[in-house]
Image: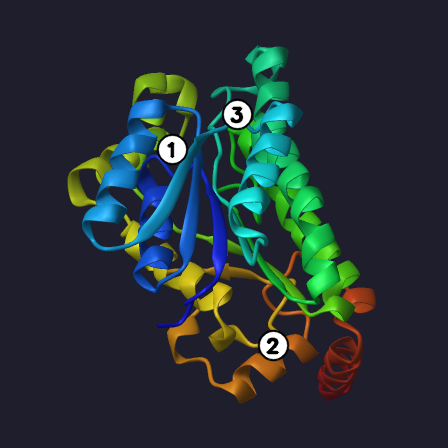
Amino acid sequence: MLLENRIAIVTGAGRGIGQCIASALAAERACVVLAARTAHELADTERQIRSEGGICQAMLCDLSEARDVDRLVQSTLSSFGKIDILVNNAGIQGPIGPLVENDEEEWFETLQVNLMGPLRCMRRVLAGMIERRSGKIINLSGGGATAPRVHFSAYGASKTALVRLTETVAEEVRPFNIQVNAIAPGAVNTRMLQEILDAGSAAGAELEAARARQSQGGTSPELAARLAVFLASDASGELTGKLISAPHDGWQRWSQSDLNQLMDKPWLTLRRMDPFTLGHFSDELSSKSAETSADR
C-alpha cells in the first residue's frame, strides 16, 4: 500500500472530486480526515470509505472561517499526532457573468473559499511538516488558472492565485523535504456544471460546452484521484511546485528521469513567455531568428 500509516486531510470531501480523492487515499491505507460544510454529504463519504475497509474521520468545516480551520487541524493532531498529507480540494464557482454585473460580496466569498481556505490550511499544517522534515500538499486548480475564463472572473482569479501560491510555497519549504503541487482535474461533471447550466446566457460561451459535457460526460474524477495518490506518495519523489493536468500531462508514464527533468525546467508552471523567463531557450530562439533573417 502506497500510503500506509500516513495521515491525510481532504477538504471538500463530501462529494465529487474530493470524495473520489478521499476514497483513493483510503484505499492506499491512508487514514483520511474528511472535511466539508454539509453534514449528510460527509456522512455519505464516511460510510463509503468504511464499507470499503478504509479508515476515516469526518468533521464539519467551513474554510472561510479561520476558527473552523484551527479546529480541523488541532483535532487531527490530537487524534493522530501528525499530518502527512493535505489536499485542498474545497472550492466554489462564485458569481457567473461579466465582472461589472457580479455581486462584490459573492466575488470576495469566492476568494475566501478558493484561496484563503487553502492558505489557512497550509499555514496550519506546515509547522508540523517542517519539524518532521516531511509532507505533501496538493491544491486543486481549475478552469481560468492558465487562460482567461470569460464570465468566471472570481473563479479564474482565485485559482490562478492558488497556483502561484503553490509555486511560491513549494520553493519556501523545499529545503524541508515538503512537496507542494497543484492538480488541474479537467472538465469533470460536478455540481459546478449544473451551476453553469442554471446561469444560462450569463455563462457566455461556456454554456454550450457545458450542455455538451452534460450529454457526453466529462473527465472522470477518478483520474484526478489517481494523480492525487501519485503526488501524495513517494512515487512522485521530490517533484514540487508544478501544476499538473490529470487528463493531459501523461504523468502515469513519468520515470525518475522524467521527474528530474521536470524539476530542472520551468515546465508545468505559470510563466510569461519572454526572454527573461525562458533563459537559455531564448538564446536559441534569438540565434534561429538571426539565421532566418540572414537567409532572407
Which one is in front in this view, the residue at disc 3 or the one at disc 2? 3
Which secondary structure lies at badge 1? Answer: helix
Q: Nearer the viewer, residue 31 or 121?
A: 31
- The residue that mark 1 highlights is 206
**Sequence-first tag of 2 and 1:** 1
Precedes in sequence: disc 1 or disc 3: 3
Judge whether residue 80 can be spotted in this image.
yes
Side (left or right) of 220 relative to 37: left
Of marks 3 and 2, which one's residue comes earlier in the chain?
3
The answer to whether residue 271 is visible is: no
- Judging depth in this view, the residue of 219 and 122 nearest the camera is 122
| Residue named by callout 2 | 262
Residue highlighted by disc 3: 62
| Up-down relation of residue 17 to residue 252 (above or below) | above
- Find numbered disc 3 in the image and state the secondary structure of the residue it sits on: loop
Task: Tell me the mark number nearer the camera, choosing from 1 and 3.
Answer: 3
Q: Which image quarter holds the N terminus?
A: bottom left
